[in-house]
Structure formats: structure tokens, C-alpha cells
Amino acid sequence: MNDELLSHVLHDIEKQIIKLLQSTPNLTEDQLSHETKLSMDQIRRGVEWLRQKSLADVTDTTNLSYSLGKNGSDALKNGLPERRLVNLVKDGPKTFDEIRSNLHGPDFNAAIAHAKKNDWINIEKTDTGSKISLKQEPTESQDEHAISLIDKAQKPRLDLVKSLMERPDFIIKHEEKTKTVSLSETGKHIDLEKLESGAIDVEADVPHVHAARIHPLKDTINEIRETFVHLGFTEINGNLSQSSFWNFDALFTPQDHPARELQDTFYLKDLNAKQLATPTQIKNVSNAHKKGWRYYWDIQEARRMVLRTHTTCVTIKHLADKKPDEARIFSLGRVFRNEKLSFKHLAEFNQVEGVVVGKHMTLRDLMGIQKEFYRKIGLTKVKFWPTFFPYTEPSLQSMVYNEKLGKWIELFGMGIFRPEVTKPLGITKPVLAWGGGIERIAMLKFGVDDVREFYNNNLSWLRTATKCQ
């Protein structure tokens, strides 16, 4: 890019950033803002403009730090469960019952497991039960050393951190992301003084103007919504936060199911639902759980508020309240799951679900509707595969053929709501349901192989992304 053209396409913000980086290379966005007195929004815009013109490079850096969680702070004050265990048996062997009187619940199991791992104790079986005795005088364990370092704001080794991360609520990981900006070789050699004083070239190319356009993911959402409406469906909406009753219990998910643990679901701390449902709905759902799962159903567990893990909670509440003889409805919106971020998983994503209620509805009808839905959004190669889902029976997995990858991939799940879901809520007609993540469809349409691409705000890609027809 020659100097005459640069004099027209460089904004004053860009010139200030270039001038600073030529004198002080490799600065963070915060440092650029502080030195130039520009706002962070101005700095981010200017850096992105320079990056698109190949005048600047941006390096992302993630700094990790750790702090003690609730259980970690307790261990710092009172000792780890295994340390408290060996203190109990220092003066002689103790029975399991004697240990349990001092170490309650999960602390007992954790103490046994880690003390054995550290080779601190012996467990002997006797006629009257098992006894625990001290095997050797324990030194400071790696976990104790790591907790001490974190308390002093020092960073422990990764293997020590990994061990503590396996213990619930012992340590909290903090990620601080920074962007370091540097000039490219072209940017380093720009003569700003010459640009400021140079003559105007009336034949120079004008700056390229990018017309506004809809975000590719939003474009896919709009297309899916329009497709449902064309198929005769009506959209329903619900809150992003839901009680565990509608998110789990009403869908016949047992209260001890792994999906309801903190590792999979985001709970709203110290927040419980005041009004769950009607007394009849609560009673019937409770009885279904007691009969089907054979355990004590706890209404307090059902009151816990969560960020909804699917849009089915909106659908089932609508059906329970309206009890339609016939209906075609769909719900579309954001859902949340405590997932580890990867090329195909997000902690927050968009989901859509369609439901058909009718007297003579069958699985064949559901497959036909599903095929027509896919056809309207441009996916023509579709097949179905038997599978299992918690609240539908029978259940199928729809598969679509990805021409780019040359193979079949899973897309939406589908099935007929189980009687344990519908009968307690007074829904008498068969309910056909299917749904899944919208990002997966968008990945197919835009040829994206990493779902995070939709949220990276890469302007060059957003401006050039062409939807696959």
C-alpha cells in the first residue's frame, strides 16, 4: 500500500496507534489507551482496522491464576480431610464408625481415598469391622503445599493444580486474557510526517466501504424461525432461568441424575422458585418419580433455579398449562450447559425445538415433518438412527450428509414424549418433539469447522462469509 493511498485510508485513531507503537513496540490495548488517551472502544476499533490492512499484528495471551474456593479455605484453616484423619489415628487405631463421628459425608470418603494414596494409613479388617491405623508419620502432601502456595498468591505447578481441581470447590481458576499489539514490517516503516504533509492524489482509490449485514448465526436463526412459521408452527417463549421442576422434574429426570450436578448445570446461587406449578401438577410429578424411580422426591430440590439447559422446559410448561388437543409450536432461544469449550461445544448456545400434538400422531409423522424441515433449509440427505433420550420413547437421532466432510453427522434428536412426562401433567394426546443446537446447522451452512468462529468477531470473515445453498 503506497503512501498516497495510506494518507486517505488511515484514520486519525490509526495514526496515533502507529506513532506510539513505532516508538514503543508491543503494547497491550490497556497500555495503548493509557498512553494515547483514547477510549478502549476507539483502541479496539483502530487496532482491528490496522490488522485488516496488514499494518498490525495481534497476539492473544491467557494468564492463569488461582484462588481458594470454599472447601479450599476450610482445608487451609482446619486441614485437608486426610490430614484430619491421620490426626485422629495418631494415638491408636480407630473404627470406621469412630472416624465417621468426626468426618462427615463426603469428607470421610475423601479422607480414606487420599490417605491411602499418600500411603499414610493401613486398613485392617477384623471380626467387628474395619480399623484404620497410622502407617507412617505424614509429611506435607502435594495438595497441602499447593493450597499454601495459592493462599500466598503464588502459582503452583500444573500437576498440583490438576489434583486440586478434581476436588469440588477447592480452588477457583481465573483466566485473564490480554491482547498485545505490534506493527507489521509495513507498519513499522510508515512515514507519518510524509503522510500528513503529502499532496492529495485525486486519482487514488477511495476507502472500501463495507455495507451492514446480518450476522451469519442470526441469519440462520431467522431462517429457522421463518421455516417453522411456513410449516404452520407458532412460536412460544420462556425465561432463560427456570426452576428445576420444569427444567428437570417435569421431564421425568431423577433428582440424582448426573445432568443435574454442578459439573453440567449452572445453578443460580441462593435463589429458589416461590411458585413451582399447580398443587395437582406438583403432586402428580412427585408420584411419577416415586413410582418410576423409587426414591423420595424432594420438593426443595425442585425449587432450585437454574439457567435452562434446553428449551423443552418452555414447551412442557406450555403444554401442561394449555393442554391442547392439537398444536404445532416451537421454542427458540439460548440455553446454558457447564461444558468445556471446544471446537464443537459451548457453554452458551442457541437451541430450537418443535412439538406437534395430535390424536393419531406417530413416529412416521415425526420423521416426515423432520425431513420437510431439513429440505426447506437446504439439507436434502437425511436419515434416522435409533437412540435413547431421557424423556422420549421411542427416540431417534437424525443424521444429515455433510458434502464437505464426505460423511454423515448427527444433528437433531427426536421422539415421542414418554407417558411418565405427559400423564402427570394432564396431557392426553401423543406429543411429537424434536430439536437441537442451531450452531450445528450454521456450521453446515457456512462451512465452519469450529463453532467458536461465530463468536470471535472476526470482521474479515463476517464480511465475506457466504452461506452454502
Image: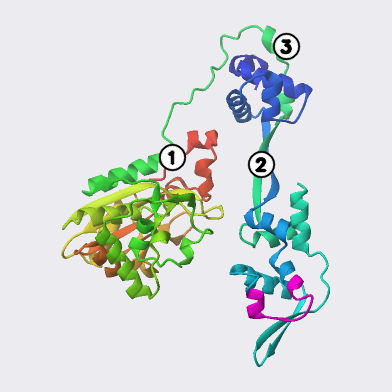
Q: Are marks 3 and 1 in contact (CB under 8 Å)?
A: no
Identify the image quadrant of the C terminus: top left
Q: Are marks 2 and 1 in contact (CB under 8 Å)?
A: no
User: In front: 254, or 411?
Assistant: 254
Identify the image quadrant of the N terminus: top right
SS of the residue under disc 1: helix
- Quarter occupied by residue 386: bottom left
User: In front: 37, or 71?
Assistant: 71
Residue bearing mark 1: 216
**Vertically, is 27 above or below 374?**
above
Q: Earlier in the sequence, mark 3 or mark 2?
A: 2
| In the image, farthest residue toward the bottom | 127
Tag 2: amino acid: Glu
Indicate left or right for 255 with 25 as reference.
left
**Vertically, is 127 above or below 5?**
below
Which labelled disc corresponds to residue 244?
none
Tag 1: amino acid: Pro
Tag 3: amino acid: Glu
Query: Badge 2, how many Cα within 10 Å: few under 14, some, many 20+?
Result: few
Residue 261 picture location, percent across and down: 50, 61
Alpha-carbon distance for marks 2 and 1? 28 Å
Residue bearing mark 3: 193
Q: Which residues are magenta?
A: 86-100
Residue bearing mark 2: 176
SS of the residue under disc 3: helix
Q: Earlier in the sequence, mark 3 or mark 1?
A: 3
